[in-house]
Image (cartoon, grey):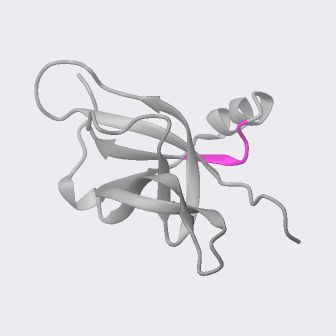
């Protein structure tokens, strides 16, 4: 049987969206985060073993969140949490039948391009 979480555990909010180019005041196109929807999530803590495995596979700069199953979420999206943009590294969706389905998403902080 799958693990069940209390609704109260999903107390944090994340914005899911895309990056689109939009002109600024000078007419130069700059990338901008466009929010499509928001979802509640719960942070997922890694065990000691999972931390070692993440380090070995080059995922030590990532973290995981859990959301209720949502088919609108895909890997080309970005997630904004506390004004920080994150790329979706992997999604582990629950495609089983019934209620109480959860998706686990691995996120990595978006790297700044150029600048100091």
Q: Is residue 44 left or right of residue 97?
A: right
**Marker count (numbered):** 0
Q: Is residue 13 left or right of residue 25?
A: left
Q: Is residue 108 left or right of residue 95?
A: right
Can you tell which quarter of the image residue 40 is in?
A: bottom left
Q: Find residue 6 and report its horizontal and vertical position in percent.
A: 21, 51
Q: Find residue 2 and report its horizontal and vertical position in percent.
A: 26, 26
Q: Is residue 100 above or below residue 87?
A: above
Q: Is residue 36 above or below residue 50?
A: below
Q: Find residue 35 and report its horizontal and vertical position in percent.
A: 38, 60
Residue 101 in magenta stretch = no
Quadrant containing the C terminus is bottom right
Q: Which segment did they paint magenta?
A: 59-63
Which residue is drawn at the image coordinates 14% and 19% (left, top)?
Answer: 97
Q: Is residue 94 above or below residue 88?
A: above
Q: Is residue 26 left or right of residue 95?
A: right
Q: Residue furthest front?
A: 27
Depth check: give the residue in front, 10 or 14. Answer: 14
Can you tell which quarter of the image residue 98 is in?
A: top left
Which residue is drawn at the image coordinates 29% and 36% (left, top)?
Answer: 102
Most common SS among magenta residues: loop
Q: Is residue 88 above or below residue 91?
A: below
Depth check: give the residue in front, 110 or 56. Answer: 110
Depth check: give the residue in front, 16 or 101. Answer: 16
Which residue is drawn at the image coordinates 66% and 33% (left, top)?
Answer: 49
Depth check: give the residue in front, 97 or 39. Answer: 39
Q: Find residue 46 and report its horizontal and vertical position in percent.
A: 57, 43
Quadrant containing the N terminus is top left
């Amino acid at each position: 049987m799958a693990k069940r979480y209390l609704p109260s555990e999903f107390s944090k909010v994340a914005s899911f969206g895309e990056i689109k180019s939009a002109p600024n005041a000078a007419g130069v196109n700059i990338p901008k985060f466009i929010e499509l929807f928001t979802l509640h999530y719960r942070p997922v803590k890694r065990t000691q073993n999972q931390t070692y495995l993440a380090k070995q596979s080059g995922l030590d700069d990532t973290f995981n969140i859990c959301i209720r199953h949502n088919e609108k979420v895909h890997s080309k999206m970005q997630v904004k949490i506390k004004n920080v943009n994150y790329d979706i590294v992997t999604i582990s969706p629950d495609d089983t039948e019934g209620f109480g389905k959860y998706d686990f998403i691995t996120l990595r902080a978006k790297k700044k391009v150029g600048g100091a």
